[in-house]
Amino acid sequence: MACKNDFERYLECKGDEIDNAAYALAVALLRTHPDQTDEEVLPWDMAIIAPIIESAQEELERSGKQTCWPYLL
């Protein structure tokens, strides 16, 4: 059972990594001044972040790449 817990933890970490990367991309695209904090630029909102991930995933799959974006409830 430890393997399952390790794998679940991996999926959680992978999901966080992907979410954070999409958020960082959005903030980088929106930032208009170097003194702005991330939250000032864009408050964390999965309603904005998820479509960015979905678009990237679709584009990668369209080019023949296999993706793994774990969706955890």
Image: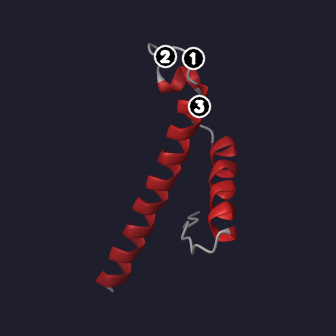
Q: Is residue 53 above or below residue 33?
A: below
Give me the residue at 47% from left, 20% from top.
37
Q: Are marks 1 and 2 in contact (CB under 8 Å)?
A: yes
Quarter holding the N terminus? bottom left
| Foreground tag (1 vs 2) | 1
The tag on residue 9 is none
Q: Determine the image quadrant of residue 32.
A: top right
Q: Amino acid at mark 2?
A: Gln
The tag on residue 32 is 1
Give me the residue at 63% from left, 45% from top.
49
| Foreground tag (2 vs 3) | 3
- Judged from the image, the secondary structure of the residue bearing numbered disc 1 is loop
- Judged from the image, the secondary structure of the residue bearing numbered disc 2 is loop
Does label 2 or label 3 sit earlier along the sequence? Answer: 3
User: Mark 3 highlights which residue?
Assistant: 29
Q: Amino acid at mark 3?
A: Leu
- Judged from the image, the secondary structure of the residue bearing numbered disc 3 is helix
Foreground of the two, 1 or 66: 66
